[in-house]
Image (spheres, rainbow, N blue to C red):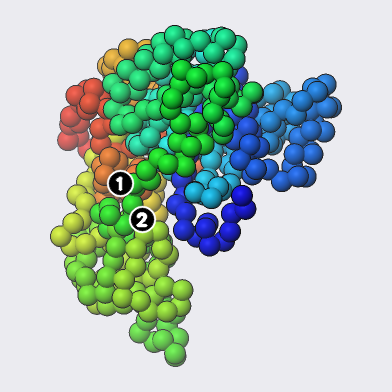
Amino acid sequence: MTTTAEQLSATTLLRFATAGSVDDGKSTLVGRLLHDSKAVLTDQLEAVEQASLNRGQEAPDLALLTDGLRAEREQGITIDVAYRYFATARRRFILADTPGHVQYTRNMVTGASTAELAVVLVDARNGVVEQTRRHAAVAALLRVPHVVLAVNKMDLVDYAEPVFAAIAEEFTAYAASLGVPEITAIPISALAGDNVVEPSAHMDWYGGPTVLEHLETVPVSHDLTACHARFPVQYVIRPQSAEHPDYRGYAGQIAAGVFRVGEAVSVLPSGRTTTITGIDALGESVDIAWAPQSVTLRLADDIDISRGDLIAPADDAPAVSQDVEATVCHVADQPLSVGQRVLLKHTTRTVKAIVKDIPSRLTLDDLSQHPAPGQLVANDIGRVVVRTAEPLALDAYEYSRRTGSFLLIDPADGTTLSAGMAGAAFAEAAEAVVTADDAEWDF
């Protein structure tokens, strides 16, 4: 059935990411999803067929639809995050196919950071492995509201229901202990197409949805306009021209919530209060604006405001502090150590900081906390306490994924070290937070 523009305009958008261990079939699943939902152009399919023939394969390798890098096609693995856009009559999709190798777990953080659903693949022959646990932990850490366990390669275990049931039970118990709110298990064969788009004739014991059916019907409940209103200032507009001699506006993208003309707001970190006198959007004045619109706010008072300041409702402003307690996923090859000087980037603001403490590191096997590890290495998940040179207005990540997240950056070369989520991501981690002392730090 052809999807009309009118139908697309009425459908919702779902962002989702795939994850899993090496050779679990993530790229094949995505390729099958695109192929069977008729989201592949003829020339793309012809290119895949030719590439498959060049590799000595008789049938098209659908994984090549997402593995676009030359190194990926040569090695038969996924290295970078591959984004694909497609639509059905019921919903539009943005998917991120993320790598499975341990050294590329950082890419999964990138792909899942904006996702509302994560598809975690498991090879039915191998069951839940360490990388499966790591990806489940990252999904929980990033507050992905929906997780699908796709038990792949069921054709290689004779479509046995007990195999699927055992894997589903183990993963569900593990993910639930991390705080994942919703887990859906689906037995599939990405290579054969079982339960991907069409129901499988080989698994009549399974009565749940196919992968595509679940993607089309899962509730997309995260509404940025319902969150605490936040506006990071990106640029100060002051033309000082004869036509606009007194114009002064603050441009940026609304991170969350709704702003209205006449509303009392606070400017952070200074704490000064004022009133919104005007909102400019696309060259026109409007009375109301909401996330994720890019607008310019005009304020009643001439306050010293610069890039990186945060504008929020006066009666709903976040706390300002120089001590940041957070859970981080370390993504750099170089370790993160206590006493290390870093840059902390939060929305449009970048400040100097120092790592005061690393209270704990998460052990993925049993979810225990390894106390005082001293440093975090690549792909570690742990708690940190950071002291910033200037005050920051951070929300808890559980309330706002946009204004509760930040990056730790190496000031020497600009390398991203860690992706941070302010507040406690896991109950166990929250109990392990060590209260930092009040010593002075030299920035």
Per the rendering, the mark at residue 255 is 2
**Between 2 and 413, which is closer to the camera in this rendering?**
2
Q: In the figure, is residue 83 to the left or right of 258?
A: right
Query: Could you tell me how many numbered marks the image carries?
Result: 2
Label 1 crowd bin: few (<14), some (14–19), many (20+), radius 10 Å: many
Which residue is rendered at x = 47% and y = 54% of the image?
11
| Residue at disc 2, secondary structure | loop
Q: Identify whether 389 is placed above or below 191.
A: below
Image coordinates of residue 292 in percent, x first then y, are: 40, 59
**Between 352 and 81, which is closer to the camera in this rendering?**
81
Residue at the disc numbered 1: 400
Q: Identify whether 18 is placed above or below 347.
A: above
Q: Are marks 1 and 2 in contact (CB under 8 Å)?
A: yes
**Between 31 and 334, which is closer to the camera in this rendering?**
31
Image coordinates of residue 233 in percent, x first then y, are: 36, 62
Picture quarter containing residue 25? Answer: top right
Q: Give how far apart the Cα atoms at labels 1 and 2 are.
A: 9 Å
Which residue is rendered at x = 42% and y = 73% of the image?
281
Q: In the figure, is residue 48 to the left or right of 85?
A: right
Label 2 crowd bin: few (<14), some (14–19), many (20+), radius 10 Å: many
* Residue type marked 1: Ser
Of pointers 1 and 2, the one earlier in the residue sequence: 2
Picture quarter containing residue 239? Answer: bottom left
Image coordinates of residue 412 in percent, x first then y, are: 49, 39
* Residue type marked 2: Ala
The single residue placed furthest to the left in the displayed view is 315
Picture quarter containing residue 426? Answer: top left
Q: For the C terminus, give its image quadrant.
A: top left
Q: Is residue 102 visible?
A: no
